[in-house]
Image (cartoon, rainbow, N blue to C red):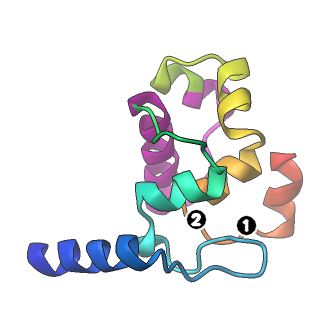
Amino acid sequence: MYSNTIEKLNLKINILDFTTDEDGFLIDPEDWSPLFAEKTLALPFHSLSAEQLNVIHFIRDKVLRLGALPPMRTVCKSSGLDKATLKQTFGSCLQLWKAAGLPRPDDELRAYMN
């Protein structure tokens, strides 16, 4: 199973093939990889930092396991980054959601994210 997962990830990285909707939200959260986040955030010349990856993994865990977006103060506390740094890195909560490879949020949640 582990080998199949690695092969699938390598295939996706090699061909940069991510299935998204028309607005760039990943259809299947299981297809997410750090490369998807880098591509979504259009990071020039570098990869995600460890802190940025921690934020994305934290968001993914909370949403996929609990079904809810954690409050920004909780994200800041867990990552050790302040709100201004998170905003500079990811832009809006909606952009962070997209970079985390989560499916399109419903209209009510989108309104909360802006």
Looking at the magenta stretch, what is its main secondary structure? helix
Q: Name the residue nearer the viewer: 100 or 63.
A: 100
Q: Which mark is residue 102?
A: 2
The three-letter code of the residue at mark 1 reads Pro
Q: Name the residue nearer the viewer: 99 or 76.
A: 99
Where does residue 34 sit, x and y in percent of width and height?
Answer: 43, 54
Q: Which corner quadrant of the image does residue 43 belong to?
A: top right
What residue appears at the point 45 percent right and 42 percent down from the top-left corner?
Answer: 47
Q: Name the residue nearer the viewer: 84 or 9.
A: 9
Mark 1 crowdedness (10 Å alpha carbons): few <14, some 14-19, many ≥20: some
Q: Is residue 76 left or right of residue 111?
A: left
Circle 1 is placed at which residue position?
105
**Tag 1, which secondary structure?**
loop
The three-letter code of the residue at mark 2 reads Leu
Q: Is residue 64 magenta?
A: yes
Q: Is residue 65 above or below residue 5?
A: above
Q: Name the residue nearer the viewer: 17 or 21.
A: 17
What residue appears at the point 66 percent right and 21 percent down from the top-left corner?
Answer: 85
Q: Which corner quadrant of the image does residue 83 belong to?
A: top right
Magenta residues span: 50-75
What residue appears at the point 47 percent right and 25 percent down from the top-left corner?
Answer: 78
